[in-house]
Image (spheres, rainbow, N blue to C red):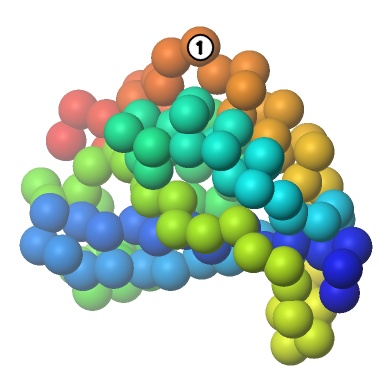
Amino acid sequence: MRNFSVFEYCYCDASNYKAWGSLLLRGAARNAEVEILQRQFDSECYFIAEQLCIPPLYSELWALTNKPSRDDHVWHTFHALRPARVQDIKALVFGSLDELVQKVKAVKAWDEALSPHWGI
């Protein structure tokens, strides 16, 4: 388990309905990676999933409304980067921690237009 990390994130619409997600990543999580992510994320936690090729979590809430609603927006929220537990290793590995950190570091500005909610 030491060689895997879990990136936990959330999508919360304006009505406070939430959908949670996590990514199993190759590589051990350290405080240095958490600090890099927080520095790059807007207000230390907000990011646009599509810009990082991370699966967006909107569709779980769309199941309640059958489509995007006026409560939807473009931002997901980072919650934790933690060591993987045995039960986490059930899923396919999304990628490596280093790859995710490099994608985040490469962002110069968050592109809201990448989200299907842009312009709603």
Q: Where does the C terminus fall, quadrant-wise?
A: top left
- Viewer can see residue 115: no
Q: Left or right: where does residue 51 sit relative to residue 23?
A: left
The x and y percentages for residue 64 are: 23, 74
Q: Is residue 51 left or right of residue 58?
A: right
Quarter of the image holding residue 88? Answer: bottom right
Against 54, residue 16 (above or below) is below
Residue 93 position within the rendered picture, expressed as x and y whole percent measured from the top left: 81, 62
Around disc 1, counting alpha carbons within 10 Å, would you say few (fewer than 14), some (14 to 19), or many (20 or more)? few
What residue is shown with label 1?
Answer: 108
Callout 1, which amino acid?
Answer: Lys
Residue 22: image location, x then y, percent = 58, 65
Identify the element where label 1 is drawn: loop
Q: Furthest residue to the top? A: 108
Residue 52: x %, y % from top left = 59, 34
Furthest residue in direction front, as rendered: 31
Instruction: Please give the count of numbered marks on the rendered protein.
Output: 1
Furthest residue toward bottom: 87
Q: Residue at x 78, y 36 (%)?
A: 99
User: In the image, is residue 26 above or below residue 65?
Assistant: above
**Residue 82 vs residue 66, the one in the foreground:** 82
Q: Quadrant of the N terminus?
A: bottom right
74 or 84: which is nearer to us?
A: 84
Can the viewer see residue 78? yes
- For image coordinates 49% across by 27% down, the residue present is 40
Identify the residue at horizontal 43%, vertical 69% (top origin). Answer: 20
The residue shown at (59%, 45%) is 34
User: Which image quadrant is residue 28 in?
Assistant: bottom right
